[in-house]
Amino acid sequence: MAAAIQASRMNKSVLLIEPSFRLGGLTTGGLGATDIGNKQAIGGIAREFYQQIKEYYAQDENWKWEKREEYMTGRQARNKEGEDAMWTFEPSAALQVYLQMLAKEKVEILFGERLLRTDAGVKKSDGVIQTITMESGKTFSGRMFMDATYEGDLLATAGVSYTVGREGNKQYKESLNGVQANFYSPTLGNKVSHNAINHNFVARVDPYIEKGNPESGLLPNISYQGPGIDGEGDNKVQAYCFRMCLTDHPDNRIPFHKPQGYDEKNYELLIRNYEAGEKTLPWINSAMPNRKTDTNNRLGFSTDFIGQNYDYPEASYEEREKIVEAHRNYQQGLMWTLAYHPRMPEWVRDVYSKWGMSKDEFERGDGWQNQLYIREARRMISDLVMTQYHCEGLEKVDDGIGLAAYGMDSHHIQRYVDANGYVQNEGNVEARVEGPYPISYRAIIPKKSEAKNLLVPVCVSASHIAFGSIRMEPVFMVLGQSAAIAASLSIDEEIAVQDLPYEKLKSVLLTHKQRLE
């Protein structure tokens, strides 16, 4: 949407194709607790969005379930007095603001059309994309094309190089990529790891269907293989979840329900983790306006459906829908278990049973969204790959088109049994960056030999761990705007996006209030 708005502002005709029936991805799909890193790194249309969120909540009529003062003074921590923007919001508020922004522009929007992911889906001539075709048979031509999806379907169908999974540390001489295994220390009685220290089980949680009996088999979703060698790569993908919008207001709450096909075995590890001594709640329940939340994963067993998304990036649309539904079913069962299962500690049930899904947010009617949190899928491989070195400021690109500032972050990737016979999670990394750093223009454009008129502002050319810092919604908006500027200038100059002089691009980026330093 940021790209479409920018293209319109540069007097270009633009078609925005939305495969679903709701604009906005995660920003309108539950991720209302903006992952920032440094607020001053966010400029341009992205900052306009957050400024308009503040204007939206300045209006009394948009506070239905609580007073503005109650939220701003008691329920939130991200918004500071005197700031020009607001960084927390309901999904419905984000959607309304986006629609207001789009209404001021000449942007044609097409809903419910999915790219035909076969050789017939993209027609190229001498490296220039001529047309793209939808499953419906509709075909669209254009001077420039942009893949702003979480999955990278257009770039893949167009024959652009990409990767899935995590590289071994040796590939880019990194230290935070590849397998990040815990190991259990009987002497210390806890897990020891240089990175993967968070979101793990307490000590000595039994993984077997019958406790202590390996021959009874493993509980669901535990790998029979070990984690692999520390630092080595694989094709596994960090866990997905739904960023739930919950409420505790009785007039707007849909109580958690037990989903069809509920099986207690799927949550036995959760129960055993508490039996083994877990003392805290498995969620990050960030307060949003109107007594709602953005609820995210926390601890060893939570909303992340670890290991159940490996096939998603390359899967067909129908297979992806099954994976999304499996995630929803898992998470519905999880929330019912936390709120009502008699084997859960009473103090846990007392908290969760007060919460439920919000009636007034999503189209399904049950409070659940359709947008799964696709933290990572395909990543393009371009002439420049952003790595840990760029995130840490040890290398700096000279063609920056926007800033990232969040820490390098990966959620868990697999669940396995350690050498001592206990369950462990693997893959979590949380490593800070020193400050905002520039993202290269080369990271959002393919190799010239592969596509001369395609831009990729989401599935950017980055290693797994660098993507973990870049992959934040404000940054995607920044990169989308910068990509549209580059596309528009390339049209004006009648050149490939790879041939656009950076100094010319930089000048226009600054004119449109992007922050590059």
Image (spheres, rainbow, N blue to C red):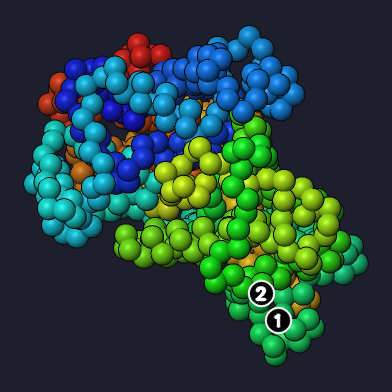
Q: Are marks 1 and 2 in contact (CB under 8 Å)?
A: yes
Q: Is residue 129 above or below residue 229?
A: above
Q: Secondary structure at mark 2?
A: helix
Q: Residues within 10 Å of mark 1 (few under 14, many from 20)?
A: some
Mark 1 or 2: the one toward you: 2
Q: Is residue 168 visible?
A: no
Viewer-side residue, 265 vs 223 = 265
Q: Residues within 10 Å of mark 2 (few under 14, many from 20)?
A: few
Q: Is residue 491 above or below residue 454?
A: above
Q: Residue 265 bears which disc, if any?
A: 2
Q: Is residue 111 above or below residue 276?
A: above
Q: Residue at x 84, y 53 (%)?
A: 347
The kind of residue tagged 1 is Ile
Q: Residue at x 53, y 41 (%)?
A: 359
Residue 49 image-quadrant placement: top left
Q: Residue at x 53, y 18 (%)?
A: 61
